Amino acid sequence: MPESSRSDAQGRSASYRIEDLDAEAELRRLEAQVRLVVPVEHRVLKEIGVRPESTFVDIGCGPGFFAERAARELLDSGARGGRVIGVDVDEKLIWLARKRAEGLNLPLEYVVGAGAEIPLADNIADITYARFLFQHLEHPLVVLAEMMRVTRPGGLVAIVDTDDGSLLMHPEPVGFRRLVDASGAAQMARGGDRRVGRKLKRYLAATGLEDTSARVHPFTTEELGVGPFLEITVGFKAGVLRPPFITADEIEETVTDLELVRETPGFFGHALGYLAWGRKPS
Ligand SMILES: C[S@@+](CC[C@H](N)C(=O)[O-])C[C@H]1O[C@@H](n2cnc3c(N)ncnc32)[C@H](O)[C@@H]1O
């Protein structure tokens, strides 16, 4: 598919295709991201109204790392009738998610489908959720309208994502800003948006959701450790960086310096996670 074509016939966003990445490393990164972010996420989700009896729809669920944890921990393994429905446009990832779920005996099912045409009935979800999907969407409001359609009146629509504006390090590796800008430009050329975090609340309000709210949570090298912090904040960038946005020499310069500065005593990194939500009018 040419670089200019931003989604394929199935509706897969060009900004995220696992086959363009080192798939093994990307699966490791997604799993680490779930492990590190889930404690905060679950706390906020309970606070805003997710209950063990909820029907929880996870759009862009990927290989299901989050969906599994939600089914087990948020929905108490289905003891009170709750269930998770994971939806992803990538058939291979849904295959993997189903395979992982085999034998787990969790209230969990997976469906192949695009966010712009969710293959679920109207009003079936108590909460419709999307994690790290919106940074890959060329038409976020179309997907949000679909998320709202499948959510029951009075139910929740919530999004978690990132924003490169909040990614800071000290000492900063040589050319780090150039690398961040280049990966953002490369993702934007494929229809993505690495500055989506700050826009989420406005997107929810523009879709007609009520009582919209947004929260940020800091993730730093202090609590995550330097290796995991870099894996989840810089790992994906490595996969999307390419000419003409940056040269191989420029990438090499920053990566080499990053290897040095991460060993600096007192090295500190900081990023924010953005969680925004709103309620479908009753
Ligand atoms: C960065 S991954 C996040 C996976 C998962 N939500 C998580 O947090 O681990 C983005 C996911 O969105 C899916 N995706 C991309 N474009 C999509 C679309 N238009 N509709 C549905 N899923 C999409 C990808 O296949 C991928 O699984």
Image (cartoon, rainbow, N blue to C red):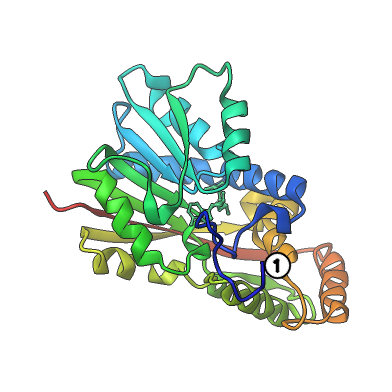
- Horizontal placement of 37 versus 51: left or right? right
Can residue 267 be seen at all in this image of the molecule?
Answer: no
Horizontal and vertical percent for residue 131? 48, 51
Check disc 1 and report the residue beneath it.
Answer: 240
Q: What residue is at 28 percent from the left and 39 percent from the top?
A: 125
Q: Which residue is at the front of the view, 50 or 229?
A: 50
Mark 1 residue's CB less than 8 Å from ligand 1: no
Vertical placement of residue 97 versus 13, above or below: above
Instruction: State the residue lying farthest toward the front.
Output: 9
- Horizontal placement of 88 versus 32: left or right? left
Horizontal and vertical percent for residue 182? 68, 79
Instruction: State the residue lying farthest toward the left.
Output: 282
Report the quarter where the N terminus lies: bottom right
Q: Identity of the amino acid at label 1?
A: Val
Vertical placement of residue 38 versus 226, above or below: above
Horizontal and vertical percent for residue 221? 66, 57
Q: What residue is at 33 percent from the left and 40 percent from the top?
A: 120
Horizontal and vertical percent for residue 215? 38, 59
- Horizontal placement of 215 versus 62: left or right? left
Q: Which residue is at the front of the view, 42 or 235?
A: 235
* Mark 1 residue element: helix
Badge 1 density bin: few <14, some 14–19, many ≥20, Cα 10 Å: many
How many labels were placed on the picture? 1
Q: Which residue is at the front of the view, 107 or 255?
A: 107
Q: What residue is at 49 percent from the left and 36 percent from the top?
A: 67
Can residue 67 be seen at all in this image of the molecule?
Answer: yes
Instruction: Quadrant for residue 267, please give it.
Output: bottom right
Q: What residue is at 26 percent from the left and 45 percent from the top?
A: 151
